[in-house]
Image (tube, grey):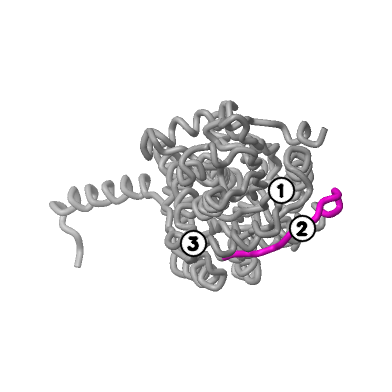
Amino acid sequence: MSITTKALPLVAALAAAFSAGSAFAQETVKIGFTGPLSGGAALYGKNVVNGMEMAIKEINAAGLEVAGKKVKLELVALDDKYAPAEAAINARRLVQQYQSPAVFVPHSGGIYAMQAFNEQEKFIVMAYSSTPKITETGNKLTIRIPPTFNSYIEPFTSYEMKKFGKKVGMLPGDHEYAKNWTQLFGPAWEKAGGTIASNNPMSYNRSADFYSGVSRVLAEKPDVLFVGGPSEPTALVVKQARELGFKGGFLIMDQAKLDEMAKVTGGLAPLEGSIGVLPVSYDERVGPKTFAAAYRKAYGADKDPTTESSYNYTLTHALAGAMKLAGTTTDAAAIRAKIGEALTKMPTDTNAGGFKGVDAVGGTIVDPLVATVEGGKIKPVNLSDLAK
């Protein structure tokens, strides 16, 4: 059946409309997250999600174009309750159902579980954990976001020994990250001339009462307590130690944040003599200051951002930049290869972590800042100064 002359204008109009619609067509790319959004580590997971959400909103508002096509990013966040097996299930769902080219995960157990198959299933593990083993495996589709924690152990040990003494009581979490920290910390403490009074791992994610475990360790009269896990349960351990009469210092793993802990302990006074990583709110560099202001605007004037938020915000921006540089939203290897370059080209005010690139094994290059609590105040300090 032929088209009549009268119908031609309508056909032309429809064709033009279709053509215009195609020109403004937008590809949606799902960025995956699996982490704890319930249980004792829920705040930790939410901090990561907040940073990612902020970055995605900024990227979409500015407009992302990859290989001549407009791209919209969308976050798909799944709760794994801090369980490695659940993280693996979530990752497969994110890749198979949502075609996510990258999955952010903030715990080492989940990272290891995903590294068992991510190269075969061709997605990037955006690993938020400072465990050195993450990049020692040789996995070519992994980016380790924070610096490794082994850089903290010697200067943290030196500080606490000089200030309080050489007898340490160990009260770490029992999750994979805390086990890795403990395996390196214990021998390092003894090598520095210290003694380990006791070692009592506890379930930071499933318990809110640590009195019996803390009491057992304090019975050995330690000078220093080694603690660490998500901020809220770590703070409860500190609070209960003080309530039981502990007067010494706290050597705090980098997962816990001093400003978040202070909200649980009732201020900084119970944290006197602690050493840990520097909270974002106390970082005077341009990137962190800009991010902190934007974070409070997005989530509330009383909401202080954490390193989880700022680092994952920066790496979400870097992931988008890498897609643009690689000219693809689907080729995980090509995107992974460009993340380091994307970090080096990132504007200073967007680089909330002060990243300088990615090293040969997939770890970010960054100079971490740490802090002590002295006189009821958080005091920024350089790592190199602590060992003097």
| Residue lying at 60% horizontally and 38% vertically, measured from the top left | 272
Res. 209 mark: 3
- Mark 2 is on which residue type? Ile
Q: Earlier in the sequence, mark 2 or mark 3?
A: 2
**Where does the image place residue 9, in percent across and percent down from the top left?**
18, 48
| Residue lying at 42% horizontally and 58% vertically, measured from the top left | 76
Distance in Å between CA atoms under marks 1 and 3: 22 Å
- Mark 1 is on which residue type? Asp
Res. 292 mark: none
Is residue 191 rendered magenta in the image? yes
| Residue lying at 54% horizontally and 59% vertically, measured from the top left | 103
Q: Earlier in the sequence, mark 1 or mark 3?
A: 3
Q: Which residue is mark 1?
A: 223
Q: Earlier in the sequence, mark 1 or mark 2?
A: 2
* Residue range of the region highlighted in magenta in the rendering: 190-202
**Where does the image place residue 30, in percent across and percent down from the top left?**
45, 57
* Closer-to-camera residue (365/209): 209
* Closer-to-camera residue (170/364): 170
Residue 29, placed above or below residue 277: below
Which element type, helix, strand or loop, lies under badge 1? loop
Q: Which residue is mark 2?
A: 196
Residue 32, placed above or below residue 339: below
Which class describes the residues within 10 Å of circle 3: few (<14), some (14-19), or many (20+)?
Answer: some
**Where does the image place residue 172, in percent across and percent down from the top left?**
64, 59
